[in-house]
Image (cartoon, grey):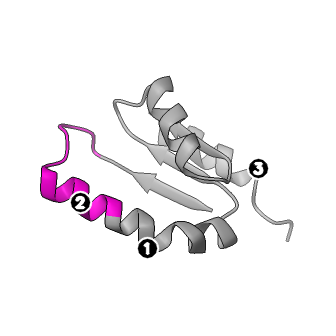
Amino acid sequence: MLLTLFGGGGRLSAAGEREQALWFKATRSRLSERCLAIAIVRPDATRKMEETFQKLWSMPTRVFQDERAARDFLSSYAPAA
């Protein structure tokens, strides 16, 4: 499972967008093989943002404004002990 915490704010610069695209390209297949779910926490989270991330990733992906809700979502994907 992957929990990401973003501070929100402005858009990425052109260089930042390139770096993000390179990271995505380099990690997509490995994450798709190994990651059960992704929770993204952003103070400015929207349904449209969630739909965009869901198109990018094959595993269940949700966007939250609240970290506790994100952790609860991920806990439902945790393997049984």
Sequence-wise, the earlier of marks 1 and 3 is: 1
Residue under the image location 71 percent in, 53 percent down? 75
- In the picture, the disc for residue 76 is 3
- In the picture, the disc for residue 18 is 2
> 25 or 8, which is in the foreground?
25
Element under label 2? Answer: helix
Name the mark nearer the viewer: 1 or 3: 1
Residue 55 locus on image (x, y percent): 56, 42
Residue 66 locus on image (x, y percent): 47, 36
Q: Which residue bears the numbered disc 1?
A: 26
Q: Quadrant of the N terminus?
A: bottom right
Element under label 3? Answer: loop
Above or below residue 75? Residue 81 is below
Alpha carbon distance from label 2 to label 1 = 12 Å
Q: In this view, does 68 lie to the left or right of 10?
A: right
Element under label 1? Answer: helix
Task: Give the farthest residue toward the top.
Answer: 47
- In the picture, the disc for residue 2 is none
Neighbour tally class for label 2: few under 14, some 14-19, many 20 plus, Cα within 10 Å:
few
Q: Magenta region: which residues?
A: 7-21
Residue 69 appears in the picture as rendered: yes
